[in-house]
Amino acid sequence: MDIAEPSPTATASRDPEGARRRSAASAVLAPLILLAAALALRGLGFVPAVIDTDEGLYILQARTWLRGGWPLVAVWDMHPVGAPALLTLAMAVFGEGVGAVRLFGALAVALTGWALHGAARAAGAPWGVALGAGLLYVAHSVLLGGLATNTEILLAPFVVAAMAIGIRGAVQALDRDAAPRWRDLVVMGLLAGMALTVKPVAVPEGSLAFLLLTLPAWWRGALPMGRGLAMAVAYAGLCATPTALFALAYAVHGAFDAFLDGSFLAPLRYGGERLDAGTAAWQVGTAMLVLAWPFVLAVLAPLLARWRRRTEAEEGGWARRLGGIGALWLVAASLAVAMPGMYFEHYFLIWLPPLALLAACGAWRLATCCIAPPPPRAGLAFALLIGALSLDAWLGDAVPRMQRGVGLREPDPVRGVVAALADAVPRGAPVLVANYHPVVYALADVAPATRYAFPAQLTGRYGAVAGIDMDAEVARVLASRPVGIVVDRGWWTSMRPTVRTMIEDALAQDYDLAATVMEERGPVEVWRRRH
C-alpha cells in the first residue's frame, strides 16, 4: 500500500500509457477489495434470523410489497418508505430470505466504502490512504448493531457519494477557482434526496455537501450570488424529488394519507418523546467507547501534525484539508444522530464515514511520523495499522456472537418460533405476534392480524406514535380471533398492563398452547386458536 505515491501528473508525463493502465487497475481494485472485505467481515451476519427488530419490520414490508401490499398501508411504520423500497429491490433480485437482505447490506457497505475512498481521493489523499478509510468504514460497520441492514446502512452510500461530490467541488474551487457544475449539483441533490427517503436525518449531511460544493467557489468569486441562490433552490427541489415521486405514487394508489402520516406526522410524534440529557450522554459515551480506536486516531492526527510538522511539498496539504473536512462532517453527522432524540446504538453508525476519514489521516500520520518514517516502511506500518484496527472491530462483534453461539453451535430461537408457528397454523392465516420479532410473519409466511406489526408500537410503550388508540386496536385484533398468537414471556412486562390483561383473557378463553421455544430472556409461546 503506497502512501507516498508520486504525483499523477509527474507519472503521466514520464509514462502516459503506464499511468493510464495503473489508473484503470486502481479504479477496479478498490471496489473489489472493499466488496471482498464487506462479505468477509460481515459473514457472521448471514447466520441469525434477527439482529435488529427494525430490520425485520422492513423485511416484512418488502415481502408484503412484492405481494401487492404497500408499506404504510398494509404494514405501518413511522419511517419513510425508502428502506422497504430498497429491500424490495434486494428481494426481487436475490430472493425473499433474510440472507438476501444481509447480502444487500454488504453491498451497501462496500459501496459506502468505495464512495468514501472517492471522497478521500477528491481531497488529494493517496490511493492507499483512501482505501484505508474505506476499509475502516467497512470493518467498523459490524459494530453497534450494524450487521443488520438498517436505515443507517442503507442511506450511507447516498450520503457519502453526495459528500464526495461536494468535497471535489470544494477542492476544485480552492485550487483552481472553478465554479460548481450544474450536473454535479443534479447528481448530488438526487443522491441526498434518496437518502432522505430512507431517513430524514440525512438533512445535516446533505446540507453540508451543498455548502462544500458552493461556498468555497462563492468565497473565491467563482460563483455569483444570483447563481448560487438559483443552485440552492434547485438543490432543495432535487432533494425533495424522490420523496415527491413516492408521494405521487401513493396518491395514485389512493393512499396518500397513509404516506403523509407514516413519513412525516408519525416521526414528529416520535420526536416528542426525547431521552433526557443524562441518558443521552450515557448513550453517546458508550458509543464513543465502542469506537474508541477510531476516535483516538482522529484526535492524534492534528496533534502529530503539530509535533512533527511536515512541509507542504512532503504532504501536499491533503491531510490538513481532509482533517478539516472530516471534522465538519463529524459535526454534521452528530447533528444527524441527535435529531430523533432517542440515541439507539445503530444511530451512531452515522458517525462512521467521517470518523473513518479522520482515523485514516491519524493512522497515516502515526505511520509516517512515529513508527517508520521512510516511505516503504511507512506504507507497511500504515497497512498494518489499518489491518489491526479492522480486525479489532470485527472481533468486537464476532467474539460475543460466537460465545452466544446462536445459529452456530446453538439453535436460533427465532427460526425455532418460525418453524413452530408454521406447524401450528396454515400458511397465510392471520396471526398476532404480540411482543416478538415482526420478521416472524415473513419467515413463517403468515398474515399480520393488524397493519401495526411493530410490537413496541402495538403493545409496548410507543403506542402513541401511530396517532390512534392502540389499546382499542389490540382489542379489535383479539375480537377478530386470529388463528395464532405469539407471546414472548421474557418481554412480557414490557407490554402495557392493559394489553397484558386483554391477551391473557383471550388466551385463556380461545387458545391452546401449541409450542414453547426457549429464548435467552425466557420462553416464547406459540398459541393456536381452538376450533
Image (cartoon, rainbow, N blue to C red):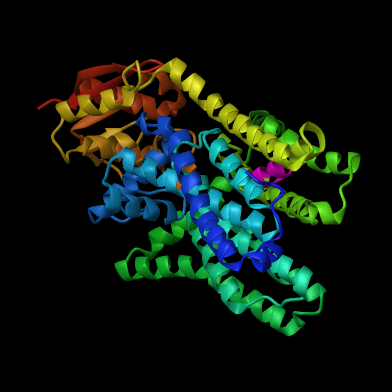
Furthest-left residue in this view = 531
Numbered range of the magenta stretch? 355-361
Nearest the eye: 177 or 380: 380
Nearest the eye: 439 or 18: 18
Quick one: quadrant of the C terminus? top left
Furthest-front residue in this view = 14
How many badges with numbers are in the image? 0
Residue 78 in view in this figure: no
**492 w.r.t. 439: above or below:** above
Quick one: quadrant of the N terminus? top right
**246 w.r.t. 529: above or below:** below
**440 w.r.t. 164: above or below:** above
State the image coordinates of residue 419 (x, y, percent, origin top left). Answer: 21, 26
Nearest the eye: 52 or 173: 173
- Which quadrant of the figure has residue 512? top left
319 in the magenta segment = no
* Residue that appears at 57% across and 42% down: 135
Residue 392 as seen in the image, left or right of residue 245? right
* Residue that appears at 68% across and 40% down: 379
Nearest the eye: 89 or 8: 8
State the image coordinates of residue 445 (x, y, percent, origin top left). Answer: 21, 39
State the image coordinates of residue 471 (x, y, percent, origin top left). Answer: 39, 37
